[in-house]
Image (tube, rainbow, N blue to C red):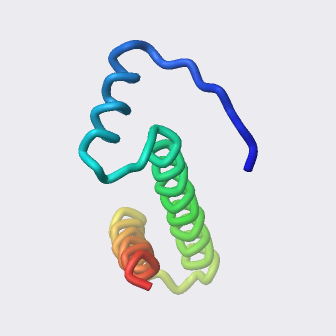
Amino acid sequence: MATMNVSLPDAMKRWVEDQVQTGRYGNASDYVRDLVRRDQDRAEARETLQQMVNDALASGRVQMTRDELVARMRSKARAAVEQKKSA
């Protein structure tokens, strides 16, 4: 596993330490890895959502407004992320 040093302002350092003290994380590295995993999941969901919107718009068969379509696709993407978390 690679090592990375990160500088944080005191308030952020205290926050990380407080999160470790809850017992949910073994150490600061565990907490940061969890944050990175969550960010990766969000980025994947955004990418999936954008692809779904692009595909729908390119199909020429969209019978709803762009806002309605985006809302629908976000809902589907959220459901997919939740399903992935449950697996």
Position of residue 76 relative to residue 19, above or below, is: below
Viewer-closest of 70 and 11: 11
Task: Please name whichever residue, 7 or 66, is drawn nearer the observer in this view of the structure.
Answer: 7
Q: Position of residue 23 (x, y in %)?
A: 28, 49
> Is residue 64 visible from the viewing direction of this image?
no
- Residue 62 visible in the snapshot: yes
| Residue lying at 52% horizontally and 86% vertically, measured from the top left | 61
Residue 32, x across and y down, in percent = 50, 42
Tell me the quarter of the picture where residue 16 sits: top left
Q: Residue lying furthest left in this view? A: 22
Q: Quadrant of residue 7?
A: top right
- For the C terminus, which image quadrant? bottom left
Q: Residue furthest top?
A: 10
Q: Is residue 51 positioned above or below 22 on the image?
A: below
Q: Residue at x 47, y 52 (%)?
A: 34
The residue most toward the right is: 2
78 left or right of 33 in image: left
Residue at 36% across, 63% down: 67
- The total of numbered circles placed on residues is 0
Residue at 65% x, 26% y: name it.
Answer: 5
Q: How far across and down, in percent of the image, does residue 25 sit?
A: 38, 50
Whole-percent x, y for residue 19 in the image: 30, 40
